[in-house]
Image: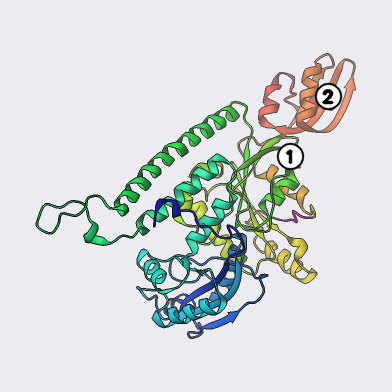
Amino acid sequence: MAVNESRIALGSTRAERAILVGVEFTLRSRIKRAGADGARAALRVNESADSTADSSPSSGVSAVGLDAEESLAEFRELVLSAGGEIVAELIQSRAKPDPATLIGSGKVEEIAGIVASTEADLVLFDHDLTPTQLRNLDSALPCRVLDRTQLILDIFARHARTREGQLQVELAQLEYMLPRLTGRGKAMSQLGGGIGTRGPGETQLEMDRRRIQRRIDHLKLDIESVRRVRRQQRQRREAVPVPTVALVGYTNAGKSTLFNRLTGAHVLSSSRMFATLDPKVRAIELPSRRKVLLSDTVGFIRNLPHTLVTSFRATLEEVQEAEVLLHIRDAASTYGEEQKAQVEKVLGELDSLQKPRIEVLNKVDLLDALARDALSNRLASHQAVLAVTASAQTGEGADALLAAIDEALRSDPLVDAEFRIPQHEGAVLAAIEAGTVIHARRYEGNLVYLSVTGSASLVGRFRAFRIQDPQLARQ
């Protein structure tokens, strides 16, 4: 595999015909889920390109809490996001992974026959493949073979728009590719010192490895400069303290649509997975009249490849620096709890699990009345969790969400205050009226008496006009 093959070319000129292979290891499934069914294998040939696509975990089990069918359904969404056309699906159940091919030699022969009959361009595995498995499958099948991580990396490469996003995706691709380069072994090794060991010198494989490693080192330096710029931007923002609230959640949970709803922005929102890679930041005003910065971030997925978490750390620093996290969840998803667990896993890797979080149950417009009642009852029984139901599409729950953000901010809390301000202090009056919620106002001679709720920082700026004993304001 040469350096210029690092980018996967799904759908470069047309929608490539793909065969999806899901895997289920029954021995591990029985350990994880008591009473699991025995092994099963199912093949369905899809003539329609309307299917959807997704991913399975790299651990060896199809997914925490998901069976192979559900995992394959999510994998379809990923394939569609990559521009592929699904022509066949296969689920292979085994007691344990085959170290040579993952799925066993018999199943490989069966897939080779399906490739011939469907004229498929590639076979996609809903699982990560080891370098050995990938090499053996490439040799045994008459088309390209890609695993789950390669597919996700290709989608990221398609959606990266900014220079920063492209750098991060390229780094993740090269780090994944480096241990998977193959060559001809000792026959083409570097020059040796004994009889029969004097090869022709440095091989193409070794040159590729060296070039890739140099490129990786260069990309890391470029990304570090991006991180420096971000740190400088945050320091400038901190000079005028405005809290940051970050949207996090599973891919396709509706983060960008909600971001647009709250900010009035027009960032790309799509039903395809990983439509957002580059963080967007906009200022919004809360019901308390406080200003906060809202940040839209990249979506997570089950067992997000470690190379992506590492490469996108510059982007994910927005999450680490945020004061409050909005965990956007798809209320209509049938495996919402598994998605929640995966998001919390990534937040744990970012040391951000202890931050104040608001769970936003999005897409409630897709629920019927019975499902809405069940959701409300579930939230009522978990009062320790700050949760809001909402629909980014219709705007339902937006006001309640903004109020919840107001409540969750702790660095600059809301306080009640009474002010007595001379009318000639126009700048002071304007600042208080613009930045606080005024509950009462009365005039007495040349004085204006105000009863307000506002941020502690703003109230503190005008302490000279504050009435320490509220009773005086009512006399």
Whether residue 458 is situated above or below residue 127 in the rendered picture: above
Q: Residue at x 63, y 77 (%)?
A: 46
Task: Please state the total of marks drawn on the protein image.
Answer: 2
Tell me if I can see residue 349 in this picture: no
The single residue placed furthest to the front in the displayed view is: 200
Q: Secondary structure at mark 1?
A: loop
Three-letter code for the amino acid on which mark 1 is drawn: Leu
- Tell me the quadrant of the picture where the C terminus can be found: top right
In this figure, which residue is indicated by the disc labeled 2?
449
Q: Position of residue 441 (x, y in %)?
A: 86, 28
Q: Residue at x 50, y 41 (%)?
A: 314
In this figure, which residue is indicated by the disc labeled 1?
286
How dense is the environment of label 1, judged by Cα within 10 Å: few (below 14), some, or many (20 and up)? some
Question: First in sequence: mark 1 or mark 2?
Answer: 1
Q: Which residues are magenta?
A: 387-393
Three-letter code for the amino acid on which mark 2 is drawn: Tyr
Q: Residue at x 65, y 53 (%)?
A: 386
Q: Position of residue 193 (x, y in %)?
A: 11, 52
Residue 168 painted magenta: no
